[in-house]
């Protein structure tokens, strides 16, 4: 008889397959030990296995969850005509393994089980109430999207929520709701607030945390408000927060940002105006590693340049979409001068601008940053000659370790230009290149032949037309933090 694998080895094998539902289903059939671990893995976040094309997912999972309801809950649903009879207990108490819960999942369960009739609103409410009671009484949640129902009053909520690590909520709920959660949840590490308002209860919940690391704030559309209570609460957690992600507006005063001395990741997707440009530009983050400017329509280029200049040598990525580009060649040259300083030697992913009046500065920048791995190059003028850029990259033979190149804006080059560039890239012995161009680029069938040729030769790893580099699936590893 073959020797049995230790449980920790089986666990590691199955954990490696945690995103592969079909393989996990196969593991169920090996033996009881494999089955037990696979069940726990499948049910830790069962909702992630739903596929848009799979209409049987909710039909299959709903009866299993209903079987986990207590006899009392089942009797309530039976008396109200929501289920027909008391269901037998399943072989596993599956809900006990669940660590993720969202209102969308509960709503789908409700839609699957409650028939259309004149009592739909009442029955919806009753069914959802019993489902939340089920999860609160049996699960130990790690990830929760907060519903409008006050979960802290459900039996078992203290045990269910005390190990919560990720919370997504809106500050439009009553403060009392968050006061209740603050008594239970003290170990939240990742907090997403959408929409963000100045809610006293939510501020209290933030202040009660012991290891808050990631905060994402979504301001309501069209509002540039700052929220002093939320800002003050976040400052109380500044020692542990490593990531701030602002949507819509900055939400807190620029003068408060300097308190986040351990911040490593700053992400901006803002349509509103920063209230004080000078205050923002002079903010110093001694440990900042990543600056992602996904959207900003109002902040001048030189403000961000000053902000970057004030970092302390830990920046590894500057990713910039093109909503606030430089307006003069002098701004580009200054940008290159700043990034060419020794303290920016850790950069491995950077957005830069191409301009013929700044090529000397660019050449020096590329020569200095031999270890850059990803470049996004945007055109400053209406059109730019890709052949000039290709020749520069080959001539300076740097960055030697470059493996991602995105030409954004209005670039023009012929298939022959590209073929010559890729041939020289191959001869230089560099790593395979992932090459991205904007959708507006008009490529011919001959162009496609060249792409295919160098992909087959292993010179090109990926080639794709994209709008935003952060949306490229093959590059998701670049955005993990």
Image (cartoon, grey):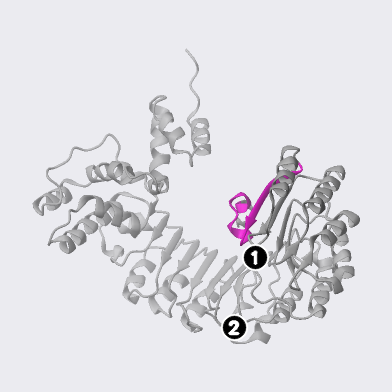
Q: Which residues are magenta?
A: 459-476
Q: Position of residue 307 (x, y in %)?
A: 71, 77
Q: Position of residue 422 (x, y in %)?
A: 80, 48
Magenta includes 467?
yes
Q: Residue at x 58, y 83 (%)?
A: 273
Q: Which residue is mark 1?
A: 264
Image quadrant holding the C terminus, namely bottom right
The answer to which quarter of the image holds residue 162 is bottom left
Q: Residue at x 34, y 50 (%)?
A: 139
Number of numbered discs overlaid on the protein picture: 2
Q: Residue at x 61, y 76 (%)?
A: 296
Label 1: element kind = loop
How many angstroms separate mark 1 from mark 2 (CA)? 20 Å
Q: Which mark is residue 36?
A: none
Which is nearer the eye, 15 or 420? 420
Magenta includes 156?
no
Is 274 placed left or right of 388 in the picture? left
Is 283 placed left or right of 345 in the picture? left
Q: Which residue is mark 2?
A: 274
Q: Position of residue 414 (x, y in %)?
A: 78, 55
Mark 2 Cα within 10 Å, few/some/many (few <14, many 20+)? many
Which is nearer the eye, 384 or 282? 384
Q: In the orientation shown, which residue stands out farthest toward the top?
A: 1
Q: In the orientation shown, which residue stands out farthest toward the left?
A: 79
Label 2: element kind = loop
Residue 401 visible within the image: no
Is 139 placed left or right of 203 in the picture? left
């Amino acid at each position: 008889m073959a020797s049995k694998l230790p449980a920790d080895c089986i666990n590691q094998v199955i954990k490696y397959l945690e995103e592969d539902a079909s393989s996990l289903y196969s593991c169920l059939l090996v033996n009881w030990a494999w089955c037990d671990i696979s069940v726990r893995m499948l049910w830790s976040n069962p909702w992630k296995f739903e596929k848009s094309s799979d209409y049987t997912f909710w039909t299959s999972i709903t009866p299993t969850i209903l079987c986990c309801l207590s006899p009392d809950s089942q009797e309530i649903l039976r008396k109200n005509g929501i289920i027909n009879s008391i269901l037998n207990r399943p072989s596993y108490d599956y809900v006990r393994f669940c660590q993720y819960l969202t209102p969308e999942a509960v709503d789908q369960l409700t839609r699957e089980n409650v028939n259309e009739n004149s009592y739909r609103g009442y029955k919806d409410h009753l069914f959802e109430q019993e489902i939340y009671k089920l999860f609160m009484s049996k699960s130990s949640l790690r990830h929760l999207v907060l519903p409008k129902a006050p979960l802290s009053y459900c039996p078992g909520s203290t045990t269910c929520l005390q190990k919560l690590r990720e919370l997504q909520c809106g500050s439009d709920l009553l403060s009392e709701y968050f006061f209740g959660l603050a008594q239970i949840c003290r170990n939240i590490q990742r907090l997403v607030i959408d929409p963000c308002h100045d809610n006293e209860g939510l501020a209290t919940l933030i202040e009660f945390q012991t290891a808050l690391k990631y905060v994402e704030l979504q301001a309501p559309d069209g509002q540039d408000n700052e929220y002093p209570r939320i800002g003050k609460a976040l400052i109380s957690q500044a020692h542990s927060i490593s990531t701030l992600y602002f949507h819509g507006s900055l939400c807190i005063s620029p003068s408060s940002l300097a308190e986040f001395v351990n911040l490593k990741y700053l992400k901006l997707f803002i349509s509103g105006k920063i209230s004080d440009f000078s205050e923002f530009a002079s903010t110093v983050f001694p440990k900042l590693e990543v600056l992602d400017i996904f959207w900003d329509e109002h902040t001048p280029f030189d403000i961000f340049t000053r902000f970057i200049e004030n970092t302390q040598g830990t920046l590894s990525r500057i990713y910039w979409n093109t909503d606030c580009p430089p307006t003069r060649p002098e701004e580009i040259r200054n940008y290159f001068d700043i990034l060419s300083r020794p303290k920016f030697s850790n950069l491995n992913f950077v957005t830069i601008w191409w301009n013929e009046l700044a090529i000397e500065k660019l050449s020096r920048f590329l020569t200095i940053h031999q270890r850059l791995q990803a470049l996004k190059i945007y055109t400053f003028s209406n059109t730019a000659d890709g052949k000039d850029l290709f020749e520069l990259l080959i001539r300076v033979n740097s960055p030697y370790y470059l493996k991602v190149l995105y030409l954004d804006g209005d670039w023009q080059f012929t298939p022959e230009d590209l073929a010559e560039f890729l041939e020289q890239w191959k001869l230089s012995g560099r790593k395979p290149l992932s090459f991205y161009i904007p959708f507006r680029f008009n490529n011919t069938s001959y162009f496609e032949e060249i792409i295919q040729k160098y992909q087959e030769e292993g010179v090109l790893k990926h080639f794709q037309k994209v709008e935003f580099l952060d949306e490229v699936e093959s590059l998701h590893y670049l955005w993990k933090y």
